Image (cartoon, helix red, strand yellow):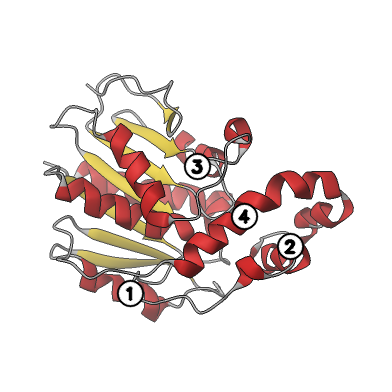
Amino acid sequence: MVVNLTGTDWLRVLRADTDPRAVLVCFPPGGGSVTAYRSLAQRFGAGIAVYAVQYPGRQDRLGEKPIPDLGVLAEQAVRDMSSWPVDTPVAIFGHSMGATVAFEAARRWEAAGRTLARLFVSGRPAPDLAETGRLHLGSDDDLIGQLELLSNDPASVRILREEPSLAELVLPALRSDYQAVETYRYEPSAPLRGPITALISDADPTTTVAQAGEWAAHTSGSFEVNTFQGGHFYLDLPENTSAVADLVTARLNSIR
């Protein structure tokens, strides 16, 4: 049984289970928080516990300084995960920036001698593709414009232009996350032993299906790519949320 980690700063319970056959740990996208996975967590049935990572600088951690380093974010999450019993079957899920943080967490998890049930990476090229953008050095308008480009509903982002006080709360963490992504550089090492499932949408401006397929080089286990309809935040569409939950459940049900 997994110990109760409700009170930790980094790991928050989105779906509790008294005797889970698997635990899914979710890493939010850039600018995001644990609420990014609340709808997904609600789609799972008995036997799967869902945790999400709360990065500093947002929601109830708003008073903390954001951390512009993907490796440090991964280390802090794994530190808390390491208090779980050694036989806990752990799978890790990340979308966008969260996919790279999830990958770094998976590396650290296995390096500590723990077993990775599966890594799910969504909406993100493989980590050895270096980012060339420097959006974190741009203006607030540049950051908001990028959000509008990626959002399923650009009009919902416009409030950041209309409400400067809201932008002052949201944009520092987003800028820090872009800095973390744009300054991240992959350090080669042995591939993961655990399998990888890559998820990609057919209209994502940040990642192609071919780029999603390049995650195959980062595991010595099995690999697959699954494609969904929608843009970068395809996971927020109800039909995709259910389909992704079904896919994850099917893969976790195969854990022995």
The N terminus sits in image quarter: top left
Q: What's the distance in space between the residues labelled 3 and 4, CA to CA?
A: 11 Å
The reply to whether residue 1 is visible in this rendering is: yes
**Whole-percent x and y of residue 155?**
80, 59
Residue 55's disc is 3
Outermost right residue: 162
Residue type at mark 4: give it. Leu
Q: In the picture shown, does residue 115 fall above or below 46? A: below
Question: Which residue is denoted by mark 1 in the rendering?
Answer: 128
Per the image, the residue denoted by label 4 is 174
Q: Quadrant of residue 125?
A: bottom left
Q: Earlier in the sequence, mark 2 or mark 3?
A: 3
Q: Secondary structure at mark 1?
A: loop
Label 3 or label 4, whichever comes before in sequence order: 3
Which mark, by number, is residue 144?
Answer: 2
**Residue type beneath disc 2:** Ile
| Label 3: which secondary element | loop
**Relative to 231, is 130 above or below?**
below
In the figure, is residue 63 to the left or right of 11? Answer: right
Question: Looking at numbered disc 3 in the image, what kind of residue is underneath it?
Answer: Tyr
